[in-house]
Image (cartoon, rainbow, N blue to C red):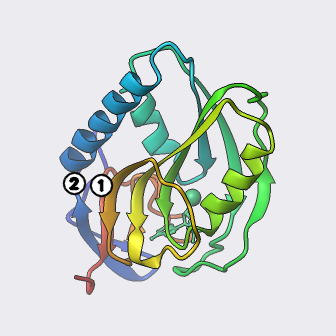
Amino acid sequence: MSLYKPETIECNGETFKIYLTKEELERRVAELGEELTEKYRGKNPIFIGVLNGAYIFLSDLMRNVAIPCEVDFLKLSSYGDEKVSSGQVTDLKDIDADIEDRHVVLVEDIVDTGLSMKYMLNKLQLKNPASLATVTLLHKAEATHHDVQLDYVGFKIPTLFVLGYGLDYAQEGRNLAQIYILDGDQ
Ligand code: IMP
Ligand code: MG
């Protein structure tokens, strides 16, 4: 299998460099999977991935969860094609599963301002799950001004625009096997 992991990458006319390697991502995702395995043993949790960004992280994470579990997806749009959040959340797809009395784990690629996470938590809570926890691969902690509960965080990162491993820039770059930042950053 040939993975897409160049040293630098041009995306929409800007140059990006590696920030988190494939090995770093694999190691952390495996640790998160082990923690979730212990926490949810006997509970048949349902993982809800936020499309599109979380699909790669979620698929790697779930393969590190060694207990029976289920998956579903929802889709939001908040970023448009820009590198900064539009500050608005739009529903594009709701979950199909009935999560009443289920143990739900919401899986995000990244929490920036926290607006999307807060919106989804409010929405899912109304469906009366038995429990509701959150996992995010990346957390731009200094940028988060909405009050959100993050139970599992892969990496706390500075307020930088990131690309790859599911995360896009105007829909490009999701298939990169590593996470990249703008060449001029850090
Ligand atoms: P928030 O609502 O401001 O927390 O933004 C969260 C959403 O914006 C995430 O689910 C991502 O889809 C997207 N996002 C935030 N930061 C980045 C980034 O650095 N690169 C790509 N997408 C991002
Ligand atoms: Mg997202």
In which quadrant is the C terminus drawn? bottom left
Image quadrant in which you'd find residue 125 = top right
Disc 1 is placed on an element classified as loop
Residue at mark 2: 21
The first of marks 1 and 2 along the sequence is 2
Say few, some or many: other residues with alpha carbon within 10 Å of mark 2 (under 14 / 14 to 19 / 20 or more): few
Residue at mark 1: 178
In the depicted view, which residue is nearer to us: 171 or 181?
Answer: 181
Say few, some or many: other residues with alpha carbon within 10 Å of mark 1 (under 14 / 14 to 19 / 20 or more): many
Q: Residue at x 32, y 68 (%)?
A: 157
Circles 1 and 2 in contact, beta carbons < 8 Å: yes
x and y, in percent, of residue 33 in the image:
36, 31
- Relative height, residue 54 to residue 102 (above, below): below
Q: Residue at x 26, y 54 (%)?
A: 5
Residue at the limit of the structure toward the bottom, as seen here: 184
- Relative height, residue 77 to residue 165 (above, below): below
Query: Can residue 1 be seen here?
Result: no
